[in-house]
Image (spheres, helix red, strand yellow):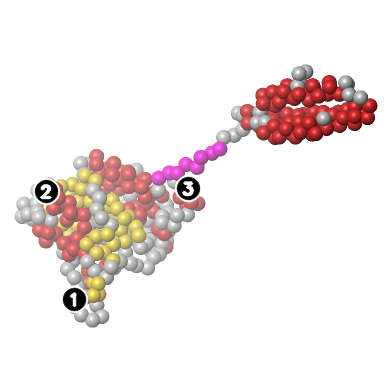
Amino acid sequence: MKERLLQLKQEILDNLGKAKDLSVLRNLETKYLGRKGELTKILRGISSMAGEEKKNIGKLANEIKTELRNKFEQVERSLSGSADKAGFLDVTLPGKKIKQGHLHPITIIQNELEDLFTSMGFMVLDGPELESDYYNFEALNIPGNHPARDMQDTFYVAPGPSPAGAGEWRSDMVMRTHTSPVQIRAMRKYGAPLRCVVPGRVFRCEATDACHDTTFDQLEGFMIDKNISISNLISVLKEMLSGIFKQEVKIRVRPGYFPFVEPGLEVDVNCTICDGKGCPSCKHSGWLEMIGAGMIHPNVLKYGGIDSKEYSGFAFGLGLTRLAMMKYGIDDIRLFNSGDLKFLEQF
Ligand code: FA5
């Protein structure tokens, strides 16, 4: 009998250990401790035992019964606790905030410019950042060894040995130094007449300061048609600047040299950081060089497959990152690519 009791106790404890919810527990309770339960039946049988055996088995049976009762209660408490936790939802707790990203200031201003230009009938084009030497320089009237190449020192990719001999090296692929190569690509693809803008990233190998970076954005714009003149260029630039700044901005136009235009112009914007008084962002001049522009050189039209006797055109290259500096009052261009969230979260 003692053996049977200990065996039953072990069986009940094993089953209790496996009980996953309260309904399983209730079934176990009925099966073993209920009115017709297996342990109850044994306990009833003790009354028919005699003498010393009755006393010893009776004591053991009562001890086992008490121990099992306690164990049932303990399991019940833990099962109802976990049920509470799983089933309870505190709807008054504040929700988890999902961090939302936003557009980079350069993208914001690029979108505004694209809207402005499409409203004036310009197409928005794209071009490769890794560009051939031919499109970046050659077809823009800047042959190899032309001194104008020094104005835009670049990153040559995968240099190979120079056919010219020892000490020199050359590569046919460059990180584009400006968005102007897309002029040629567009002329060849679409022909004339043509109205396009090309926003995009450009790269230059140069020392950085508050208004120069090695990676920055430009927006190329060009218009080719019959009888296009400098006055068309100036009026488009004015339209663009007043659209971006939403107010009259002071500009200054001076002669500039770019081999792919004739005549060439530089357009400066009155520095909005210091209000023209002079600061590191404008190199203490009160003006920030913002746009290179001019009438497209006949050689460039020829490279693009357009008859320069029939068509003329203007082109400009806007420093998009510098425009963003002026619009948002940012005094150091290097902040744009810094990845600094304290800076970026202000937009
Ligand atoms: C050019 O890149 C010419 N492709 C522009 C052009 C296009 C002229 C079509 C004529 C016709 P430039 O090197 O000046 O020109 O650069 C144009 C503008 O880019 C500058 O006015 C300036 O706003 C910006 N820029 C130039 N270098 C940097 C730099 N290192 N960091 C930031 N912005 C720059």
Amino acid carrying mark 1 in the image = Pro
Pointer 3 local density, CA inside 10 Å: few below 14, some 14–19, many at least 20? few
- Whether residue 288 is visible here, answered yes or no, is no
SS under mark 1: loop
Task: Name the main secondary structure of what is drawn in magenta.
Answer: loop
**How far apart are the alpha carbons under marks 2 and 3?**
43 Å
Image coordinates for residue 321, horizontal then vertical, percent: 35, 54
Q: Earlier in the sequence, mark 3 or mark 1?
A: 1
Amino acid carrying mark 3 in the image = Glu
Can you identify the residue that label 1 sits on? 163
User: Is 55 placed left or right of 73 in the picture?
Assistant: right
Give the image quarter of residue 251. bottom left
SS under mark 2: loop
Circle number at residue 241? none
Give the image quarter of residue 208. bottom left
Q: Is mark 1 within 8 Å of ligand 1?
A: no
Q: Quadrant of the N terminus?
A: top right
Q: Which region of the structure is painted magenta?
A: 96-103
Circle number at residue 192? 2
Residue at 18% x, 63% y is 134
